[in-house]
Image (spheres, rainbow, N blue to C red):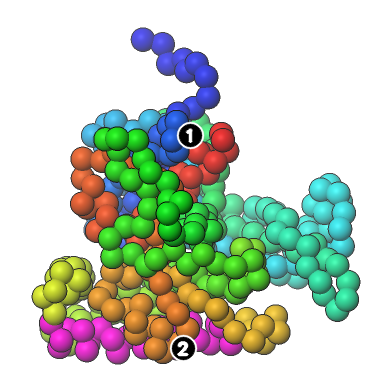
Amino acid sequence: MFGFRFGPPKFSLGVDIGSSALKYVMLKKGKTGPEVVAAGIESYPEGVFVDGIMQDPNAISQMIKNIKKEQNLKFEQVFTSIASQNTILRFLPLPEMEDEELKHAIEGEAEQYVPYPLETVNLNFARLAKVEQDGTTRLLCLLAVAQKEQVESIVGIFRSVGVKQLDALDIDSLAIINSLEKFMKRKSGPDDVVAEEGDEPMGTMSGVGSSPDIGDDEVVAIVCIGARSTIINVLKGHVLRFSRNVQISGNNITEVIRSVYKFTFSEAETTKIEKSVASVQGEVDQEFLDVVHTTIEEIAGEIRRSFDYFKAQHREPLIHRVILTGGTAKIKDIDKLLSSELSVEVVLGDPSVGILRALPNEDSFIENLQQYSVAIGLALRGVEAND
């Protein structure tokens, strides 16, 4: 059978090669909007990642091959990301100019921000918005830098599974923003979209915060607490203005559980997940929550310091609200605790807004929704590109 495809691609696959697990989401383009038709989280064999650094790309290639076969994944469009902790992001206010001039200007600016020889890195940039700076209108650009060695390693993984060319190699922090864009802009109420009969409706998942209906001038932080790091993005008027990665996160909570209960790391991770789910379902272990909350307070301290730096740098008096995502977001009452520590409203983000569902494992998808933020944001690139 020939492998030709007639017409535009129908499927978009987002693969998040995280440091603790591989997550994937496949979207199908439908008449009423994108529909998630496959999703999963696969733990790595021991030794694939050590201290957050990929050690065995061949093992990841084999995982993707297995998942493709078992889940009948389509490689029509494939999107993946590089960890923001392995990249450099800088915000550059520049005079308005044409793309070619801008490219040269940014390459010239890059030398002062990149601690590696420029021939060893990949540079990319994006126009963000026009901003006022000291009475002058400037063009705010985002410079993204990644080492070629890391990029080539990720590209090589997909090449080995039959993907001749990735449709995009994104940065996880930007994919997270993309996954929550509709959540941030959506207004709850009688105008909610209703899906066709037989489909699961679009909208806010059970246990996820209400859509925030963010104003055009509001300053909003998207905080993703993952396994090895916490990503803090700050947007004003839906435009990214600040991004920082801090090295205190879900694994720090696991380490505290391991120490208190004398578990192995693996046992502590399992306990964290099981007791977090049980707490949400009403089976509260107060001793466990007290242990966990100590580390969450430390995470809140790092977030607060990032907010203070942003406010001082940009002369902004306050952060209007925080949208929380990432696997650690499933811990019971973490949003309330962070809200108390940061003195700002915190809501759980829903990356599934605007997406229909046709999954055999829908309960698992909903339960782990926060962990899918990067993969959903990646897969949406293909859907949006073809609208």
| Residue at disc 1, secondary structure | loop
Q: Is residue 174 left or right of residue 365?
A: right
Magenta-highlighted stretch: main secondary structure?
helix
Q: Kindly identify which residue carries mark 1.
A: 77
Query: Can you give x and y, in whole percent of width and height, for residue 246 in the image?
Result: 48, 77
Query: Can you give x and y, in whole percent of width and height, for residue 256 in the image?
Result: 24, 84
Q: Kindly identify which residue carries mark 2.
A: 343
In the image, residue 125 sits, relative to residue 79, either above or below, namely below
For the record, the magenta segment spans 285-308
In the image, residue 310 sits, relative to residue 232, either above or below, namely below
Instruction: Say if the magenta span includes residue 296.
Output: yes
Residue at x 45% of width, y 44% of height: 379
Report the mark closest to the observer, 1 or 2.
2
Q: Earlier in the sequence, mark 1 or mark 2?
A: 1
The circle drawn on residue 23 is: none
Given residues 196 and 30, the one toward you in this image is 196
Res 374 seen here: no
Crowding at dot 2, Cα within 10 Å, few <14 / some 14-19 / many 20+, comes out as few
Q: Amino acid at mark 2?
A: Ser
Query: Which residue occupies the extreme top position in the image?
Result: 1
Q: Is residue 330 left or right of residue 120?
A: left
In the image, residue 101 sits, relative to residue 166, either above or below, namely below
| Residue at disc 2, secondary structure | loop
Q: Amino acid at mark 1?
A: Gln
In the image, residue 206 sits, relative to residue 386, either above or below, namely below
Given residues 188 and 220, the one toward you in this image is 188
Residue at x 35% of width, y 77% of height: 335
Res 218 seen here: yes
